[in-house]
Amino acid sequence: MQRTLSLLSKISNAGNSFITAKLRERHYGQLAPSHGDILILLYKYKKITMQEIAAKIFRTKATVTVLVNKLEKMDFLKREKSPADSRITYISLSEKGIKFKAVFDEISKELNQMLYQNFTAGQIERLDHTLEKMLKNTSGHSPKNRERSRSDKQAYKNTKRHCSF
């Protein structure tokens, strides 16, 4: 029981190493696993604000800005000011980002196969439920989590049904 956090950390590290290796194999070594959270949102919503990204991926606005800047520099996404309110910036995929979805999906599928080998569908569902419950238990224990609304957490949960890099 007391090893849970350590095991989760090791699984996370192994998953990130797996993703990094698969990205390098496909000549996308400049991308990092942390970019996957933003890409999956853009594949789902097509166009989203920086503030919405931060809320949905449980990151600070400053962290999201760094990640978005790097993805923009690599031409995976583009920014667009809102015509109604210049304080709002929308993020959407560039042509390169759209084309990358096939690679993203392949790596995500391989990651799921690696992580869930020898698991039944029922075991996967119970594991997801248990980890979601554990995540809920951690809310309110960090300044970042206190800022998140219930709807933000639900939106994040819905985007992460299976592992995606």
Image (cartoon, helix red, strand yellow):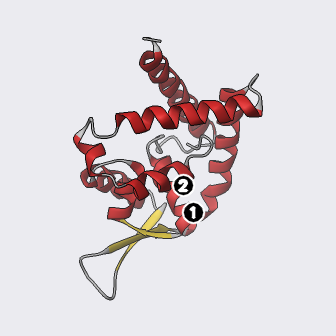
Question: Which residue bears the numbered disc 2?
Answer: 40
Q: Position of residue 94 (x, y in %)?
A: 51, 68
Image quarter of residue 126: top right
**Residue 98 in sight in this render:** yes
Q: Quadrant of residue 145?
A: top left
Residue 131: percent from the left, percent from the top? 52, 32
Quadrant of the drawing holding the C terminus = top right
Q: Residue at x 48, y 45 (%)?
A: 31
Work out whether residue 48 or residue 129 is closer to the camera in this orientation and state it. Answer: 129
Residue 53 figure quarter: bottom left
- Indicate the amino acid at tag 1: Lys
Residue farthest along the top direction in this orientation:
2
Do the residues bearing badges 2 and 1 touch, measured as CB atoms within 8 Å? yes
Up/down of 84 relative to 62, above or below: below
Amino acid, disc 2:
Ile
Q: Residue at x 30, y 56 (%)?
A: 65
Numbered label attached to residue 44: 1
Say which residue appears at 24% left-offset and 52% top-offset: 62
